[in-house]
Image (cartoon, coloured by chain):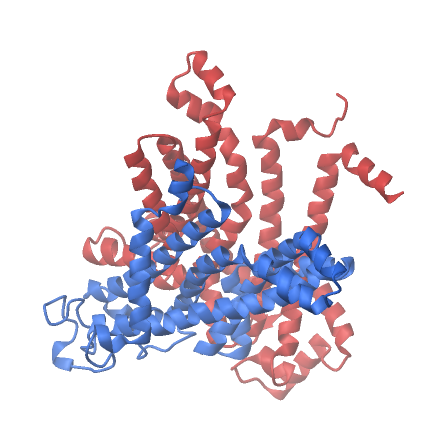
Amino acid sequence: MSRVSKSRTPARHPVARRTLVRLGASLLVLWGAVTLAFASLHLTPGSIEDTLIGQSTVTPEVRAQIVADYGLDEPVHVQYLAYLGRVLKGDLGHSYQLHDSVSSLISSQAVPSLQLTLTGLGLAAVTAILLSLLTAKRSRLLRGVVSGLELVGISVPVFWAGILLLTVFSFQLGWFPAAGGDGFSGLVLPAVAVAISVTALLSQVMREGLETVLEEPFVLTARARGLSDLAVRFRHALRHVLLPAVTLGGWLFGLVLGGLVTIEMIFSRQGLGQLTLNAVTGKDLPVVMGVVVLTSGVYVVVNILLDLLYLVIDPRLRGAHEPGS
Amino acid sequence: MSRVRECRTPRPGVWGAAVFLVLLIAAAVFPGLLVSGDPNGTDMLAALQGPTADHPLGTDANGRDLLTRIVHGARPSLLAGLGVTALSIAAGTVIGLAAGLGGRIADETLMRLVDVVLSIPTLMLALLVITITGPGVFNTVLAIAFFMVPKYARLIRTQVAVIRRAGFVEAATSLGLTRVRIVLRHILPNAFQPLLALATIEVGAAIVAVASLSFLGLGAKPPAPEWGAMLAGGRDYFSVAWWVAVFPGVAITLTVLSITVLGRYLQRRLEGRPA
């Protein structure tokens, strides 16, 4: 019985089914992150009001208000459901240290962080594509040098890459502002720091893929049609190695988000990283919980976007939902 | 023939990595053999000196010799890296075994939990734990270990699920061996094999994570000769003394690079691919 249904369902609408499964998994991830945040609040030793208040001092009225707002006199499962409900409505709680709601704190700090993340990732993608396309299956020496550089790039800690760039290009050469810095000139060094390890990882994966793809018969066909070597690489081979690179996308995004905390500190930039670090050192748990929930939300959205990107890159996946055609 | 040879003879890079790691372990066990002097011995007259014959890597703002401090920094970094890896392998093995040998419900529940943890950046989760437990060396190691568990759990589970159906396990069962004995003597040793390469590479990742948290001021505190903490303590002097910014980071990078190179060599050898 179960065998029959098993073999029938996936054949019918593979794309729709896959999307549904992915969506379900995404919701599960989000739910898990929210639960984790809630659990961390309750696992903290001491009373929950004290944890929520952190190191700031509040009047007894505010304390009573917190107990009422969070339903701290209710049983745990009621509190949990209430917390889930609040998160669903976009209410991530209140930072008593910064006298503001966590949601508005996050949204005010999100823009500079997003700028940095996207610039870093974009830079990494372009560099990795060029690097891998231009060096795959070239001379031994060139490949040796590039793969050595990739290994170093993977091994360099993000925060030290930031320190090194700051020391060389701001303090020694004076090309870029050392701290803060509005606009483009302040964005360059942090973006490069963020991009280094991502570039190295991507380039490595894509170069390995290219070495196999360039052996395929279709490459020979393209060459026989008189295409130049570069045209074969950029117009035909690239598409094939983008897929494995995109698969890494969600993970790389997480890598960059994790790196924001140190990079924003080193370059004295505003952003989510600074907000998180100050919250951790100040024991401002509501903010840290909010950032964790947000991070998992971003991860889920990024993965859904990447899933759509698969369809753009590989047309074969698009036609798959019409069996028999 | 040549494939086999290629597989057995490591490249020069692998030798370099091995030599560096031997030096590093020597530095961690007997720092006094490589450098003389106290890593915390201050000499205000020699503060912030560039590399000289007396101080090959220069001195910091309190006149402490950077080379001495970097050599002494090998122990906390290696201990933290190995500690994180050992803790996470232990927990990952238990979870992986439970998922691989338990029923479907246990398997699904544990693996979905693993998915959740893997979807949030390790550093973010570690920060959440540190907010609760407070900063400190032990707490950072624990926080990072906790979130490296899923990788091992997943790997062990996959291995166990395959191995438990292998012929030799069936043979052991038909010989009447106890379940515990089969798991400990026959399934686990085989499941551990691919773990070796992953664990090696992850020691490097753990060292970076620990150093990052120390740099943020959440792990080892500045006077301690720990690489991340040295960079944190030198932050105010990067603009006037480049060596304070450069050398501790070189130590971290070379360590991680060597570990990665060696880990990948192991991986290729275990998979029988050319080195």
Say above or below: A316 vs B231. Answer: above
Residue at the farthest front position: B175
Identify the residue shown where x is 46% and y is 42%: B273
Identify the residue shown where x is 73% and y is 77%: A71
Identify the residue shown where x is 13% and y is 77%: B46
Report which colour depicts chain B: blue
Residue A28 lies left or right of residue A295; in this view the side is right
State the residue in front, B150 or B139: B150
Residue at the farthest right position: A1
State the residue in front, B89 or A306: B89
Say above or below: B203 vs B159. Answer: below
Residue at the farthest bottom position: A60
Say above or below: B43 vs A204. Answer: below
Image quadrant where one finds the C terminus of chain A = top right
* Residue A277: image location, x then y, percent: 46, 68
Say which chain is red: A
* Residue A239: image location, x then y, percent: 51, 29
State the residue in front, B75 or B39: B75
- In the picture, residue A92 is in which quadrant? bottom right
Residue A39 in view, yes or no = yes
